[in-house]
Structure formats: structure tokens, C-alpha cells
Amino acid sequence: MSERILIVDDEERIRKLLNMYLVREGYEITEADNGEDALDLALEQDFHCILLDLMMPRMDGIEVAKRLRTQKSTPIIMLTAKGEENNRVEGFEVGADDYIVKPFSPREVVLRVKAILRRSSETTFIEADASTKDVIVYDHLVIDNDAHRVLADDVKVNLTPKEYELLLFLARSPDKVFDREELLREVWHYDFYGDLRTVDTHVKRLREKLNKVSPEASDMIHTVWGIGYKFEVNE
Amino acid sequence: MSERILIVDDEERIRKLLNMYLVREGYEITEADNGEDALDLALEQDFHCILLDLMMPRMDGIEVAKRLRTQKSTPIIMLTAKGEENNRVEGFEVGADDYIVKPFSPREVVLRVKAILRRSSETTFIEADASTKDVIVYDHLVIDNDAHRVLADDVKVNLTPKEYELLLFLARSPDKVFDREELLREVWHYDFYGDLRTVDTHVKRLREKLNKVSPEASDMIHTVWGIGYKFEVNE
DNA sequence: GCCCTGTATGACAGTATTATGACAATTGGA
DNA sequence: TCCAATTGTCATAATACTGTCATACAGGGC
């Protein structure tokens, strides 16, 4: 029996994007494009989680959450545009369980949904994620995400935000090929519609910086001809 | 089996904030928005710790603590607004184990809760409080939190309260990056909704004062472009 | 080898982010 | 109350980062 998720956003584009990624994970999706419908749906059906846009015409996310909370405790993940972040606290006040700032990466949303569902299903078991320090270690490359620091052969490499994000994303899924479109969506986030070749340039700059310190580290970023790039561990 | 904490405060905003941070640490949370419910809950269930607001309608924290203490010795951390501090002594009289003044930093609360739980679990073993001395020592920088004094290359640096708090906060989590929002929440406390750039200005002033005495000490405060700041130890 | 397609590179202009300095508001004592 | 220190905000200057494009280069099929 798959878990049911309600997606609420007035932008169809966002709904479809989330839908696609969540269906792929096996969730059953329902969509609503306004707060009123969302509230009705959420009250009459039992969803396991609700992805709720903050800003919507007629009834906004805060109001939906507030009213829903008088009846049910369905987990809510608020979607909020940058700049609306001041509503963040207000969102938590009315009982949102998590917050995602737009534009998000679809993969990130999937991870958060999973986290919420896990949390609400196994309230007994605690994962001490305090100790889960976020460090990726390979022979010639270490990425410490807490410190936001990259070491190639023990030498610090200064990366720009995009270079860092790109490397982190690739390194988190070693040996998996991503095409440029996918990378733009994940690293540049969904609202970026730029030149695919932008990725190439960033890969170039990233390799350049790594290569200066450690050719081996630089070589971990492979070009897959005709497809895209991957972070290769073996060999 | 996770440890159970009861949060008692009439302000929902405060409850949610504490809830969020404590859940993240793996604690199991129960909330109450008034003293009567709190007392009932605390008597019928066994909590490992109670976060108790001092000022509440109907039955205040003092009264709750007093009555609870006739039956149980559950550790109590009192939450008290600035200006209510006169009740502090009275609070300790009725058996509060610790005191936190509002507005607090969420992280601070987590630390105190951990401390209380640690203390109550190892009542047999006494840790020599010499080791608990709150002094942070680095090559070019010493922060003596007992004396509230900062030495850069053995020279005393006069910092304003905010500068001091900022430095202390950063230095307590070396190599970890904090964004401006997080710093505002932790150093400026949860009720501050100001300009994010306020952080920049304080960092500037802090660096200025440190730099005058020890450029090395000043350089420990790193800007992480696109993210925020961190206190860097290595290199 | 030759061509076609895809990738790497280098330069540049535009954009975003941070540092700084000045000022007003606030606070905390004397 | 007034003064001095501290604090928050803002405009501006100084930096750093990005995306795009034109061009050079490389891989693969024939």
C-alpha cells in the first residue's frame, strides 16, 4: 500500500515537477491548485504528508495549515519562495513540520518527504543524526559539508558556491551519470532555464581548481560522451 | 528508547520552536499550554525533563513546580522572561534545576537539556567541575567565558556584548558554517527579526578589533561566500 | 582521413554578494 | 535626566561569481 501525498501549489509547473519525482518513488499523488480545495481534500481524505505552497490566491498556506490543524495532524511541508522567509516562524507556529525554500531541487524534496514519513512512522526509533556528520571521503578528495570545505590530497580548494554544489551533488551519487538537463535541474534548481553549456563551463572551472592541487581528484569527474558527467570512484 | 520531554508554555510560538529543535535531537516531545494540564501530565506520565514557563495564566510555573515536587523529582528547567528574574530565587527554592532567560537561543536550550539529562543519569559519577571550566583556547585566541574575557595573542580585546557573543558562538562550533539567519536566531535570539546584514556589520567590527591586536586571530573568522560565516581552526 | 557532433576553453559583460562607512536609534549607567 | 557606548540600518564601494558565446579541440562512424 503506497503512501499518499497531497501537493498544493497554484503553479502547475511546480505540481507536475513534484508529481513526477514523487510518483517515481512510489507515492500516490493528489494535486490541488488552491487553498480551499486543498483544505477540503485534506479533511475528507487521510494523506500521509502534504506539500503546501505558502503563497496562493484566496487562501494561503498558513491559513490552510491553521484550519487543518484544528482537526488533523497530517505532516505538512511548507514550500516558500525566497524572501517570504519571514513567514517561516509563522509557518512553524501553525504546525508546519518542515520548510523548503523555492526554488528547490526535486531530489531534495524527495529526501525531506522521506524523512518526514520516516519520522511519523517510527516515532519510537531515534536516529541520532547529531552524530551523522556530513563528510564525504575518497582517496584524493574530502568534502566536509559542515565546514563547507573541500580538500584535495589534504590541500584546501577554494570553490565558488556553484562549483561546490556541483561537486557535492556529483560526489553524493558516485558512478552515476547525469545529463546536463538533470544537473541544471538539481544544482541550478528548477527555475533555471539557461544554456546547457553552462554546465560544461562549471565543470571546466571545477576541474581546473582541483587539478591545480590534485590531478587524481580532478580525474574523478568524468565526461560521458554524448550523455553528460559523472563522479567516478573505481579504477 | 528516546527520552521524553514536556514543554510547558502558553505561547505556541515558543513551544513550536523548542519542539522543532528538540525533536531534531531525537527527544520525544509532549506539549502543554497551561499549568494545570502540565501538572496533570507530569504526574501521570514519567518525563525525563520538563521545560516550564514561569509566567502563565491560571497556574504559574512556580506553583506547578511546587506541587509536582511533593510527588516527583523530575528535572525542571524554568523559562523566565527578562525582568521576571527576581523570581529566580523562588524558582530554585521550589526545586527548579536550571534557569533560562527569554529570549533564549534554541541551541542553548538544547545544551542545557542535555546537561540536565546527563547529570540525572550519572548521579553516581561526579565530574570534577575543574574540567567544566568554560575556556576556549586556540593558538592566537583565548576566550575565557568565566571571566568574560578575550585574549588575542595574550592581549586583552575589549568587545561589546554582541561582538563577544558572536565570537563565542562561532568559536564554540569551529569549522561549522552558519548562515546569517541562523546566527541571528542563535546570537540575537529568537525574537529578533532584523536585517540579515546586521550580522555583516558585527563581523566587521569584531574582525577590526581582533585585527588590531592579532591578524591571525582575526583571520579565524572566515566568510563563506554565498552562505555565511565560520570560525576556522585548521590551516 | 574526413565529417559531423559533442566537448573544452578563454574572454567578457552582467549579476550577486560582501565589506565598509556613516548615521540614527537604542540602551544602560552615572 | 543626560551622556556615552552600543546597536541596527542603510547606501555605496569593492569583490567575487555566473552565464553566454565564439572558437578550438576531440570522439566516433564511415
Image (cartoon, coloured by chain):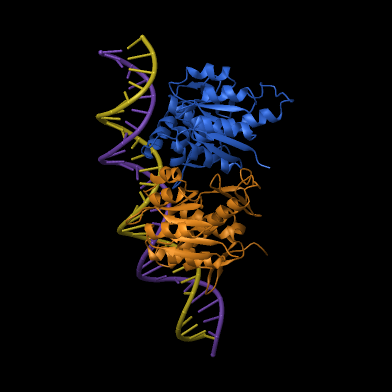
Chain colours: A orange, B blue, C yellow, D purple
Most foreground residue, B193 or D18:
B193
Indicate whether B216 appears above or below A106.
Answer: above
Look at 72% across and 23% down and name the residue there: B126
For the N terminus of chain A, the image quarter is: bottom right
- Position of B179 with respect to B234 (left or right) is left
Q: In the picture provided, is A140 more to the left or to the right than A202?
A: right
When the figure is inspected, residue C17 is found, relative to residue C26, above or below; the finding is: below
From the top left corner, tell me how far across and down residue B154 is, in percent: 54, 22
Q: What is the quadrant of the C terminus of chain A in the image?
A: bottom right
Residue A188 at least partly seen: no
Q: Nearer the viewer, residue A123 or B160?
A: A123
* Residue nearer the viewer, A150 or B68: B68
B100 shown above or below D1: below
Q: Which residue is drawn at the image coordinates 36% and 38% (left, top)?
A: B195
Of the pair A144 and B103, the residue shown nearer to us: B103
* Picture quadrant where residue B129 is located: top right
Q: Position of residue D24 (x, y in %)?
A: 44, 71
Q: Position of residue B73 (x, y in %)?
A: 65, 25
Location of residue A87 with respect to A14 vertically, above or below: above
Residue A5 in sight: yes
Residue B65 appears in which quarter of the rendering?
top right
Percent x, y of residue A43? 46, 56
